Image (cartoon, grey):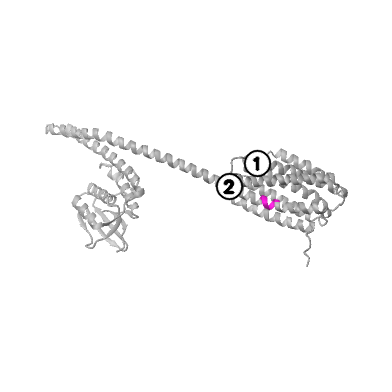
Amino acid sequence: MAIPELDTRTLLAVLCMALALSSLALVLLYRLHRSLSGPRDWAIGMVAISVGVGLLYGRNVIPSFLSIAVANTLILVGHAFLVAGARRFLSRPVEWRWLAAIVGAFSLPIMIFYDAPDALGLRMVSVSLGMSFLALLGALAIAHENHFQPNARQVVAGLLALHGVINLARAVQGVLEPVLTTDIMQVGPSMNTFFLWAILFFFGMTAGLSVMVTERLRDMLQDRLAEQNAARCAAEEALQEQRNFLTMVSHEFRTPLGIMAASADLIACNLPADDRESAEELDRIHRASRRLANLVEGCLADDWLESVAQSRRSGELDIGDVLTELASEYSVVLHGSAEPIRVDADPYLLPIAFSALLDNACKYADTPESVTLLYCQKGKTVEVAIRDDGPGVDPSEVSRLFEKFYRARRTQHKPGAGLGLHLVQRIVALHNGSVRLEQTHGTVFCVTLPVLDT
């Protein structure tokens, strides 16, 4: 059984379907990447060409003005939008005046002679020259841009250049070999060849433009990663400079602070017992030097914690042993479980957190004997509570209690820099735990940590 040859109308129908699919793909491309310049014009251009070819297909069914004049004009307008989208995508001026001049110049003969039966050759030459000039302009615009990766750009530029050459050859053929028929469907093999090329061209253009967008997104991502890498390097350099500065400040401040404290102590030893005024001034010197020393030490501790936060050491610790040692050091009462409760913790960091909480409790408690340390296992966690009978924290300030350098109003009279609780929270977070404040029965800081499976 012989396979029938494709006639011109069948090829035109296939071209209509190909253009419809290409239009849909470019519209989706635009909707997915609205922030990019270019896809919108490509979508408009492909839709215009699709409508124009569809009107050509309706020849002898719809009015001649629509199927000839409007159809060919839409095809030229669509090519102009493809060129405009390429220039806009490459951040170049669109030059709508020149594009409009080309569309107007080559659509004018079609508008004038759309109904003349013997002007088919003139119309074909006119629309072919218009598409040729527009395609060659688009090829030059894309080939001129060297910023992006060349693969898809070269393919699209080559397709446009080839499309321009084919249309130019078609126009020359129309001039050298006058068209004798009055029906575009009866032109012959040359028209079939052109429609076959058009199907391939528009499919190739759609794929090439999509890959160009992908390459643009890839380049934007690489640029963003390079910017972030440069910003990270700058931040690391600034952080290292800050650490060097804090180390220098620590060295430079500790010596004069020590001299001040020693001198104040010496003067206090030689003061007469009845010299109250000098004693008060010396006490102020002691308080100020301690406050400044605490601030320096707190800043250094925070900076040190920043450096070790990314590489916390891991070890199996018995929470009871850690708290027993701290309770003995601070002379506080300890209540806990007789069974060992083991946690995965840094053997240096975790005791620092509990030590800071105990130091706060002893500092702000009304009676030192009220400070108690309790711990017990609750399911897969262990809860450690440090209790005292101090003035507590105003409810309006609880949300800011763990902020860096923040001090509650009720604690302003005590020495401190507002870094202790901040460090506690950061250390506990490094151990996948949590810390909270309860004030139902005194002031209680509760630390919850995950326990190791036995």
Which residue is nearer to you in this view: 262 or 6? 6
Between disc 1 and disc 2, the foreground one is 1
Which residue of the protein is positioned furthest toward the left in this rendering? 273
Give the labeled residue for mark 2: 215
Q: Tell whether position 204 is magenta.
A: yes
Amino acid type, mark 2? Glu
Range of residues picked out in magenta: 201-205
Q: Which mark is residue 284?
A: none
Q: Residue at x 84, y 44 (%)?
A: 176
- Classified by dominant secondary structure, the portion drawn in magenta counts as helix
Is residue 113 at least partly visible in the picture? no
Task: Tell me the SS state at disc 1.
Answer: helix
| x then y, percent, for residue 170 | 79, 47
Residue at the extreme bottom of the image, as rendered? 1
- Residue 88: percent from the left, percent from the top? 64, 42
Q: Where is mark 1, residue-wise?
A: 143
Q: Amino acid at mark 1?
A: Ala
The residue closer to the viewer here, 300 or 398, is 300
Circle 1 residues within 10 Å: few <14, some 14–19, many ≥20: some
Location of residue 96 (image quadrant): top right
- Residue shown at 62% from the left, 50% from the top: 210
Residue 375 left/right relative to 241: left
Query: Which x, y percent locates residue 288?
Result: 25, 36
Report whether 126 appears left or right of 359: right
